[in-house]
Structures are given as structure tokens and as C-alpha cells.
Image (cartoon, rainbow, N blue to C red):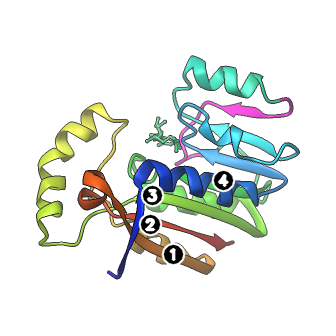
Amino acid sequence: MEIQRIDRTVSQERERWHREALGSLSGRVLDIGAGSGISAAFLPGDAVWIALEPAPSRRLKRAVAGRPGSRLLAASAEQIPLEDASVDAVVCSMVLCSVDDPQRVLAQVRRVVRPRGRIVFLEHVGAPPGSGARRIQGLIAPATRRFNSGCDPRRETASTLRSAGFSALELRTLRTAGLLGGLAPVIEGRAVV
Ligand SMILES: C[S@@+](CC[C@H](N)C(=O)[O-])C[C@H]1O[C@@H](n2cnc3c(N)ncnc32)[C@H](O)[C@@H]1O
């Protein structure tokens, strides 16, 4: 795993990614595991935001209500209640660590995105096997799985993305600054369906 070091903290990197990756999307954009709805502020005004979240919070409902034309899907990404080829892009932000079945989610993503549509992703991933960080991830995993939306910090999401059958996959692995950067590498990139 080639890891590029960057000076930004994970939250600074997250903000940069949201600005750049989401700002370039258009049409119908499915946001899987939308959380509190952070994506809404970064999508172009004319993009249609479709927020998918299994248990939508009041905050997410308010964010959807505050963006005319947007839509809330109270569902899990393993079974996306949308027609085949019905969206232009998918946003995957810090969610493949939390879903039950990442392979199945990516198969669903391929199904609902139109041909030549795009997926953009930012995910934290497992530290290199055998490293101290990986051992710590193993120690904290039972707690994060239980108390942090099912998050498993050890997921090998880069491999899952590589074997999902996308074309033009661009992916880089980053070590962000600060304590969290040392504990969890981040992958970011895009792919075409
Ligand atoms: C760490 S949060 C990320 C939220 C948001 N994407 C962001 O970047 O701030 C992970 C989200 O994934 C959601 N989630 C967990 N399992 C899911 C599933 N099977 N399908 C869709 N979303 C899921 C959680 O409810 C939570 O809102």
C-alpha cells in the first residue's frame, strides 16, 4: 500500500474533498449513508440530492426539506430502492466502513448509476497489516462497531473498490496529519460505471 503524507488533518481533508469532488457533480446525485446531510452544502445548486440513510435523523430530514427537489430514502445501501441506471452519480463518504456488506453495496451502486455515471469516494481504511496502528484498530473495533454506526476501522475498502468492476478507477491513499492520521489511512478517488 503506497501512502501519501499530507499536511491537512482528516477534517480539513474531508472539507477539501467535499468541496472539490461534490462540487463537480451534476444531475441526480445519490448520497449513500448521508448522515447529518453534510453533502447538501457542497453540491451545485441545480444538482438533485437523493439522501439515502437507514435511520434518518431530524437534522437530515431538515436538510432534505431545505433543499427543494431533493429526496430522502430511508433505506440501506445493500438494497437501494431506485430503478436501474436512474442516477448520474453516487457519493460515498465515510460509509463503506459502516455498511454490513460493502461488496453488495457497490453492486447496488453499479446497478443504479447510469452508464458513464460517476462514483466519488472518501473512506478511512485499515492500516497496513502488522502495523501498530492496525493492532489498535483491532482493539477499538468492537467499540466502534457497537457505538459508531457499525464502523469497522479495519476494512480493506481499496481492494473492495478495485474488485467491484468499475472502469477508470482513480484512488490514492493518504496519511493525514495528527493522531487520527496515524491511526487510519484515508482513501479518496473516483470511478466511472
Ligand atoms: C460515519 S457516517 C458518514 C455520514 C456522511 N456520509 C458523512 O460523510 O458525514 C456513516 C453513515 O452510514 C450510515 N449507514 C450505516 N449502515 C448503512 C447501510 N447499510 N446503508 C446506508 N447507510 C448506512 C450510518 O447511519 C451513518 O449515517
Of the numbered discs in the image, which one, if any, rests on residue 19? 4
The quadrant in which the C terminus is found is bottom right
Magenta residues (range): 68-79
Which amino acid is tagged 4? Answer: Arg
Q: Residue at x 54, y 41 (%)?
A: 33
Give the residue pinned by disc 2: 187
Q: Secondary structure at mark 2?
A: strand
Q: Residue at x 31, y 58 (%)?
A: 181
Magenta part mainly helix, strand or loop?
loop
Q: Earlier in the sequence, mark 1 or mark 3?
A: 3
Q: Earlier in the sequence, mark 2 or mark 1?
A: 1
Q: Is mark 3 within 8 Å of ligand 1?
A: no
Vertical relation: 62 (above or below) 37: above
Q: Earlier in the sequence, mark 4 or mark 2?
A: 4
Q: Residues within 10 Å of mark 4 (few under 14, many from 20)?
A: some
Q: Residue at x 84, y 42 (%)?
A: 45
